[in-house]
Amino acid sequence: MSAGDLVACIQGLYQSGGCVKMVPPDNRCCFFLSLRLGVIIIGLVNFALYTLAFSWYIGTVGINAELDELEVSNLDISVFVMFCVQLMVNLLLIVGAVKRIPNHVFPWLCANAIVIALLMVMIFMLVFLGASRNSLSYHQYVSSLSLISILVMTDMFCCIVVFQFRKNLLLEERIRLEEIARRSAGVFIPSSPPPPPYEEAAPGQTPAKVPLEALEDPPPEYEAALAMLSSPPPPGPQLRKKSLTNHEV
């Protein structure tokens, strides 16, 4: 066995064993942005929006200017907890995107899934109860429904981007670990890709078909077969028919 046959044998065992080299994932996001840059922008925008929303809530609802004292209700506590959670998960999202840590991205997905569920409940209540039972005018009803719907669609799109980014990070980590395992085990990795199929190598041309008569002789007629059976075999060693693959006798 030559060196070329040994290399071909190793390549065949390597590809048949399910150790084919994986293709890196696509990290494109929107227009010229990558998934990493898109996730960083999502974290920064959400951090700024939640900070502005909480500041507006404190300035308009949280402080009672007439009594000159701070009144804390259950709604205020809920808003404050939600604000702290969102700030924390958005900071983790930014750090996870910058340092490529998939575990830092998962809390953001969980927190925003809860936010989407709450917004969907609000949409259901607006649609089911209507404007009169919610003590809203027609203009307020349409504006609230449109605003909440836009928030749900935007948050869902951000969740899809962040989820795809986390999935690509896990896939890249898996490829890196498999590459380290191959190098440590000394597995031969083919440098050249396999040849393309005939349709890609010669587009627009049909592959030539070899007729069956050129590969082997046609069977004999009935009378000739009977004559061959009745006649005694010739003396000497008998030669078998040539093989179709290696032309050996």
Image (cartoon, rainbow, N blue to C red):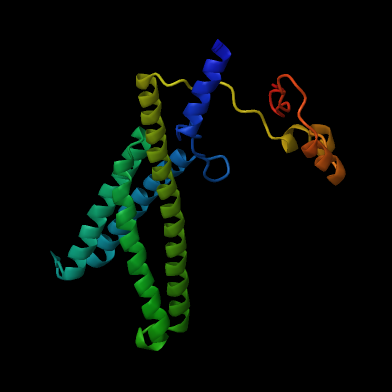
Q: Is residue 62 shown left or right of residue 144?
A: left
Q: Name the residue rendered at 44%, 79% in the picture.
A: 141
Residue 61, horizontal then vertical, whole percent: 25, 67
Residue 174, horizontal then vertical, whole percent: 38, 35
Q: Name the residue rendered at 46%, 43% in the picture.
A: 38
Total count of labels: 0
Q: Name the residue rendered at 49%, 33% in the picture.
A: 16
Q: Is residue 245 shown left or right of residue 156?
A: right
Residue situated in front as seen by the camera: 79 or 198:
198
Using the image, determine if residue 29 lies above or below residue 6: below
Residue situated in front as seen by the camera: 16 or 31:
16
Residue 6, horizontal then vertical, whole percent: 52, 16
Q: Is residue 33 shown left or right of residue 179?
A: right
Residue 201, horizontal then vertical, whole percent: 74, 32
Q: Name the residue rendered at 58%, 44% in the picture.
A: 31
Residue 200, by quadrant, is: top right
* Quadrant (top left/top right/bottom left/bottom right) for the N terminus: top right
Residue 219 visible (yes or no): no
Q: Is residue 196 shown left or right of residue 103?
A: right
Residue 71, by quadrant, is: bottom left
Residue 75 visible (yes or no): yes
* Quadrant (top left/top right/bottom left/bottom right) for the C terminus: top right
Residue at far top of view: 2
Residue situated in front as seen by the camera: 55 or 16:
16
